[in-house]
Image: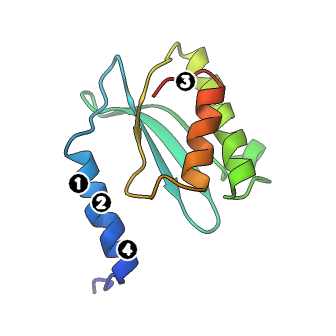
Amino acid sequence: MFKKMNEKDRKRLHRKIHIRKTLSGTPERPRLTITRSNKNLSAQVVDDTEGKTLASISTMEKEFATLKPNTTDAAKLGEALGARLKEKKISKVVFDRNGYLYHGVVKAFADGARKAGIEF
């Protein structure tokens, strides 16, 4: 009934739980969380006090369907999310890497958001 986790997934889940103990999104500084898979990349900005998603972006959206989860496209997606956040007058966020290592695609996405003017 339950899928048995491999060692890599178990370690990521452990890191995710450890990170989320200290991170929380507020109305002043919402939480930017990223999710990646082999085919897609998505991110959302969450206000944890109200439990609401303020903005989101994904490679599954029609305008970003051609992007792949690699470093160059992740940077473009980060810049696009930064532009959406600027429209909503959000300039500071708390970055939740969701247990993923801050390397490669995750780092490129964060750098793209910083390039658009979002502070972490």
CA neighbours of label 4 inside 10 A, class few (<14), some (14 to 19), many (20+): few
Q: Quadrant of the C terminus?
A: top left
Residue drawn 30% across the image and 60% down it: 15
Disc 1 residue type (three-letter): His
Q: Are marks 4 and 1 in contact (CB under 8 Å)?
A: no
Left or right: 71 in relation to 33:
right
In the rendered image of this protein, does residue 13 appear above or below residue 95? Answer: below
Q: Which residue is mark 2?
A: 15
Q: Is residue 57 visible?
A: no
* Vertical arrangement, residue 114 with respect to residue 74, above or below: above
* Amino acid type at image mark 4: Asp
Element under disc 3: loop
The residue positioned 60% from the left and 21% from the top of the image is: 117
Along the polypeptide, which appears first: circle 1 or circle 3? 1
- Mark 2 and 1 residues: CB-CB less than 8 Å, in contact? yes
| Whether label 2 touches label 3, CB < 8 Å | no
As shown in the figure, which amino acid type bears the numbered disc 3? Answer: Ile
Q: Kindly identify which residue carries mark 4.
A: 9
**Residue tagged 1:** 18
Nearest to the observer: residue 71 or residue 65 = 71
Give the residue at mark 3.
118
